[in-house]
Amino acid sequence: MKKPAPTALATHATVIAAHGRHYLAQLDGELLHCVTRGKKSDLAVGDKVAVKSTGPGQAVIEAVAGRQTLLFRSDQYKSKLLAANATQLFIVVATEPSFADDLVSRSLVAAEAAGIQAHLVLNKVDVTEALPQTRNRLQLYASLGYPVHEVSAMNMPEATRALLAPLLEGHTTVFIGQSGMGKSSLINVLVPGAEIATREISAALDTGKHTTTFTRLYRIDDHTAVVDSPGFQEFGLYHLTEGMLERAFRDFVPFLGHCRFYNCHHLSEPGCAILHEVEKGRISRMRQRLYAQLVHESSQKLY
Ligand code: ZN
């Protein structure tokens, strides 16, 4: 028997995909094509919403529950919501093609600013020629306390699943990565039926062929979900203020408050505790340079 469409105001639907002002919400396993009231369009995948049925498979979003966390990117002009209520961020990198430290560090800064635990997943470890050098590069992040997991989604799917699946349990985990890192293969290993679900979501949102250009949430069980976001080549953080940025660099935190000037920008000031640590080789110069770049971007924001 076909399940009747929900009639009362239900408060526990979850937004699982967004495309423009069209949202797809999941309620008790059923997909609802939703619109918002008025011009409201600041919902994110992972938002808990109250919906009211407007027809079979259709609903209007009446209210949004308070968010535990909110992960976002931004450019000079506006912020772009990535996911709401996520508890973990898994950053996928690979032995080849090579990954950009800039993007990894920006992702880590976004996670820190959102209060989300970040992990790194090194994919394609079967490409043994590139492995030692890649491990070397990831040592920096491991030394900062970010867990690094080595997998090969393509060639060792069972081992990959055995390693990562327990880490996902009870969490809403966002997977992000540069294009080419093999994130889609990884999602397919970890989420049974991901490709079918994506086709359904794409059809429901009428996104045509652009099946990988939108963020979507896959529910694995009542307490576990995986969010897949499109591969990216840039990660803007214009929305973060200088104060938020310095605290989002885990390596800076022990030295904050130790600079000669209380309002030190950690750029070129005399007596800067951060720059002193960089000179001594205890903070990576790459990280301090990225910090300076992000402070610059933050000052260029136009909203
Ligand atoms: Zn300083």
Image (cartoon, helix red, strand yellow):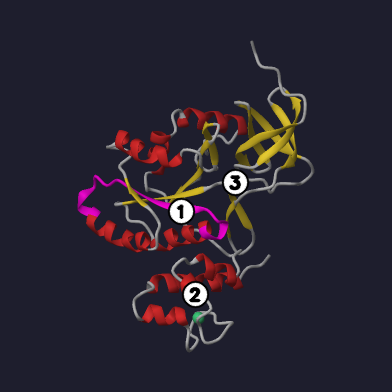
- Disc nearer the start of the sequence (3/2): 3
How far is mark 2 from mark 1, CA to CA? Answer: 22 Å
Reply above or below: 1 against 128: above
Please, what secondary structure does the residue beneath circle 2 have?
Answer: helix
Residue carrying label 2: 292
Quarter holding the C terminus?
bottom right
- Disc nearer the start of the sequence (2/1): 1
- Disc nearer the start of the sequence (3/1): 3
Give the mark toward the camera: 3 or 2: 3
Reply above or below: 155 against 287: above
Q: From which residue to which does the magenta span run?
A: 112-131
- For the residue pair 3 and 75, the one nearer the viewer reads as 3
Please, what secondary structure does the residue beneath circle 1 have?
Answer: strand
Residue carrying label 1: 118
Q: Position of residue 225 (x, y in %)?
A: 52, 37
Quarter holding the N terminus?
top right
The residue depicted at 46 percent of the width and 81 percent of the height is 273
Reply above or below: 114 against 213: below
Residue carrying label 3: 85
**What is the three-letter code of the residue carrying label 1?**
Ala
**What is the three-letter code of the residue carrying label 3?**
Asn
Please, what secondary structure does the residue beneath circle 3 have?
Answer: loop
Farthest residue to the right: give it: 38
